[in-house]
Image (tube, rainbow, N blue to C red):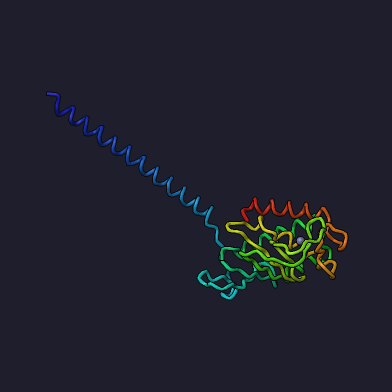
Amino acid sequence: MNTPWVAYNYAVLLKKGMKKLLKRFVIFFTLAIIFVTLTTCTYTWRATPSNSGSINLCKPHRTQPQMIKIPMFSQTWQIVEDCDVFNREKVGIALLVFYNAWRLKFGDRNGQVWSSLNDLMIEWSGKYRKIPSAFSMDGRPVTDVRISGLALTKTMIWVYVGQNEKICETSFVHELVHIAIWKLKKTDGDPDHLGKKYSGWSMNHNILIQDVNAMLCELGL
Ligand SMILES: [Zn+2]
């Protein structure tokens, strides 16, 4: 006799259960969409330059090195073998971080260091370079040495980049110090670092390099 009543209750319970399940599914699905959207926004940061001629942008399918304009700097360019090494916006930010740290530590009253960063050619390379003579960090002359960076002139640096290396792991900041000293001294960028043959480089420059690289690493650059 109780069967229809039990069946009715069972149907109601089933309907309620389904509703609950559906509600949970909708909540889960909504949260999943929010999560994906948030993480996507976090990890796919992308610059959308306007008024930037295509000549300034890297073409990913090119196999030859390309010369790319660095944003925010008037006459600063880079030569890259691969568009990801390094993205021009990242290099622009790294230059700004360097300049800010330099200005806070040493000042730049006449804007000379700023102008040196605005007239610079940066060449990135995946291959080491060997040169007949150079100086160690403490000023000792070394011959036939494999180098990872070089300030070629007062407006050009060459920097080696290993696989998966970040800007903060290269000698980029070190070479920028040579460029800044070269601009201020006019005659040279103090190639022997802490050595006594050339003047300009001090322990404070070494500290600056460490600090700037730490900041760049923290930024993921
Ligand atoms: Zn050096």
Quadrant in which ligand 1 is drawn: bottom right
From the top left corner, tell me how far across and down residue 22 is, in percent. 32, 41
* Along the viewing direction, whichever of 50 and 53 lies nearer the viewer: 53
Q: Position of residue 218 (x, y in %)?
A: 65, 50
Residue occupying image coordinates x 56% and y 73%: 64
Q: Does residue 51 appear in the picture of this structure?
A: no
Q: Residue furthest front?
A: 144
Report the number of numbered marks.
Answer: 0
Residue displayed at 69% across by 68% down: 73
Where is residue 23, by image quadrant?
Answer: top left
- Please state which of residues 108 and 221 is positioned toward the viewer in this rendering: 221
User: To which quarter of the image does residue 59 belong?
Assistant: bottom right
- Residue 83 x %, y %: 56, 66
In the image, residue 120 sits, relative to residue 204, either above or below, namely below
Relative to 221, does residue 31 appear above or below in the rendering? above
Front-lying residue, 63 or 29: 63
Which residue of the protein is positioned furthest toward the left in this rendering?
1
Q: Residue at 47% across / 52% down in the picture?
A: 37
Q: Quadrant of the C terminus?
A: bottom right
Image coordinates of residue 156 in percent, x first then y, are: 72, 70
